[in-house]
Amino acid sequence: MERLESSEQFKALQKRIIADRDPQIPMVVIPAGTCGQASGANDLIRIAKREILAHELVTKIQLRVTGCHGFCQAEPSVLIEPEGTFYPRLGIKQMTQIVEAVSEGRVVEQLLWRDPKTHKRVQREADIPFFRNQRRTILARNEKVDPIRIYDYIEHGGYAALVKVLEQGNRRWVVEETKASGLRGRGGAGFPTGLKWELLAKARDGGGKFLVSNADEGDPGAYMDRSVLEGNPQSIIEGMLIGAYGTGATAGIIYVRTEYPLAIKHLVIALQQARALGLLGENILGTGFSFDIQIVKGAGAFVCGEETALIRSVEGERGEPRQRPPYPVEQGIYGKPTAINNVETWANIPVIISQGAAEFARIGSPHNTGTKIFSLVGKVKNTGLVEVPMGATIGEIVHGVGGGPAGRAEIKAVQTGGPSGGCLPAAMFDLPIDYESLSAAGSIMGSGGMIVMDENTCMVDVAKYFMKFLKDESCGKCFTCRKGTQRMWEILDDITAGKGTLEQLDLLEELAQVVKDTSMCGLGQTAANPILSTLRYFRDEYVTHIERKFCPATVCRDLFAYRVIAEKCTGCTLCIRVCPTGAITGTKKEVHNLDQSKCIKCRACFEVCNFDAIAGDAIIAVPPGRTSMERNP
């Protein structure tokens, strides 16, 4: 790989790369991010290579292995370019059929995606509602590049934004353009990126400045940053290079979780290739501008997503937050000025520079410009990564992109912002997703986690689950956070066990507010959100747990027992087959029996029954040796 010494050499290389590929030759694209590989993408890659070589199709078919395309529900999948033909949930034999069909210019109709409403086959990816209802700016680039081939990135416009900046030679312009775009940090409270860069540019240079990409994505159910790192690591490197040029930063760090091995592997390769081409390191493209990036692996502490805790972790210390001021842009890593942005923020920088701040700002809403990637998971038909304009409503994501409820139960709520986010009821799904609206509703944007819950979800149990996560992840530095989260979890545990009192609800609310007001960092300041939001919108569930000693969603095991409804049981034996303890007995086409002494309340029978013949009843008095039930209305 020849080192480039000037922008002219880069442009010549880009032209040569584009000219070398014939766009008319079909391209078999196989997404192989973590989700794809877990679903069997590596088998598809192996079969595709075997078939192409065995039938001497090297000059007729090209193969590109990419990161995640976002539609995780459909993995392993294949995309055929340039037609845009999409094949979901493929097996090894089906991959053989597709290679043969592509070589003959055919489409395998029976393998195309089927619309669950119309039952019609849809050929083009762009016509599938999951993709059609998005505005894909960052994620769309994952489909175009092999993450371990820098030439793929350059072919599709990669590093052109960096060259534009270097040729212009105006550092101030970079900061002003970022400010004019209205881009806000995509990993937390939404601080304006351009303003943060301006503060770093003005900070005294006492031996260097740092730029950091925060890839410490610790929210359960969130994997946006991981997918961008796995699928397009060069975009993060280019974004950081542009930021370094504009702010005068001299060193970069990508702080990534050790639990992301594939992302780390692709990052290492991407950094090596960028250095080899002369796009990273000393005297970049002969301009005298120097900047390099190193990887620092985090140990998985959730609190290290907070920037001051992250800084201590980078320095080799225990990840604990510190008081601010001084802010990191004044005194950060090793006491040097430091600006920290998350992965998605950095991926937006080349887009802003390439298309211009004004064009970028046209997408989204005032003060909330551009697109935002969400991790859509839970009780929804289409799970995966969703990219929509800022200001889109929750309903547009959950129903328009997600396809609505995954089962027969109606959607009840959605939690945004990860463990520190809030739970918003379905009645509020017309709420626009922006920093201010979510905050006013009692939630946060966070990094973009979005967990959908249906009527079979207990909101008290949800609050308890996230409070356990937060108490375990608290660094313990603040007394109110350390003991407050523990005590809140204990109260929630009492309520779900039937030991709660109405007085405890007032105490719970008071504790939540105290922890919110007195904690030092974002973890403690937002730890109350799951409790405060569920008390605000689902207080009746708390009261039912306390007064009736019953969980309406039949989730809290200490408060109910399952039974078979004789009038509805058809004797299909499905519940018998899934029961892990043999608690259900009976013969085919006859009413089954459920032995309470063997039932472990795993919900398996409840989940599989197609006739609503399994019900959960409240246990209201349990003397030794007998069970008294209150029928669930």
Image (tube, grey):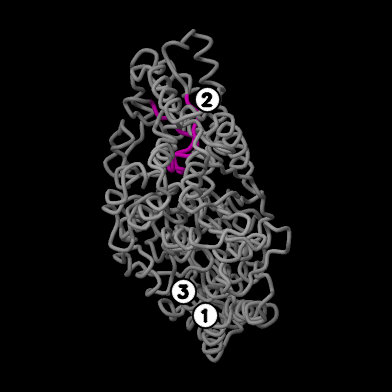
Image spot of residue 506 (x, y percent): 52, 89
Hey, which quadrant is residue 317 in on the image?
bottom right
Hey, which quadrant is residue 123 in on the image?
top left
Q: What amino acid is labelled 2 in the image? A: Ile
In the picture, measured across the screen, residue 237 lies left or right of residue 445, that is: right
Residue in front for this viewpoint, 397 or 143: 143
Q: Are marks 1 and 2 in contact (CB under 8 Å)?
A: no
Image position of 612 with respect to 500: above or below: above
Q: Residue at x 29, y 65 (%)?
A: 430
**What range of the chain is rendered magenta?**
64-80
Dot 1 crowding, Cα within 10 Å, few <14, some 14–19, many 20+: many
Q: Secondary structure at mark 2?
A: helix
Q: Please give the label number shown on residue 92.
A: 2
Q: What amino acid is labelled 3 in the image? A: Asn
Image position of 300 with respect to 62: above or below: below
Q: CA distance from mark 3 to mark 2?
A: 47 Å
- Mark 1, mark 2: which one is toward the viewer? 2
Quarter holding the C terminus?
Answer: bottom left
Decide whether residue 74 is among the magenta residues: yes
Decide whether residue 576 is among the magenta residues: no
Task: Tell me which numbered mark, 3 or 1, is placed earlier along the sequence.
Answer: 1
Q: Please give the label number shown on residue 88.
A: none
Quarter holding the N terminus?
Answer: top right
Task: Tell me which numbered mark, 3 or 2, is placed earlier along the sequence.
Answer: 2
Q: Residue at x 67, y 68 (%)?
A: 320
Image spot of residue 325 (x, y percent): 57, 74
Residue in front for this viewpoint, 565 or 474: 474
Q: Please give the label number shown on residue 545.
A: 1
Residue 115 visible somewhere in the drawing: yes
Q: Are marks 3 and 1 in contact (CB under 8 Å)?
A: no
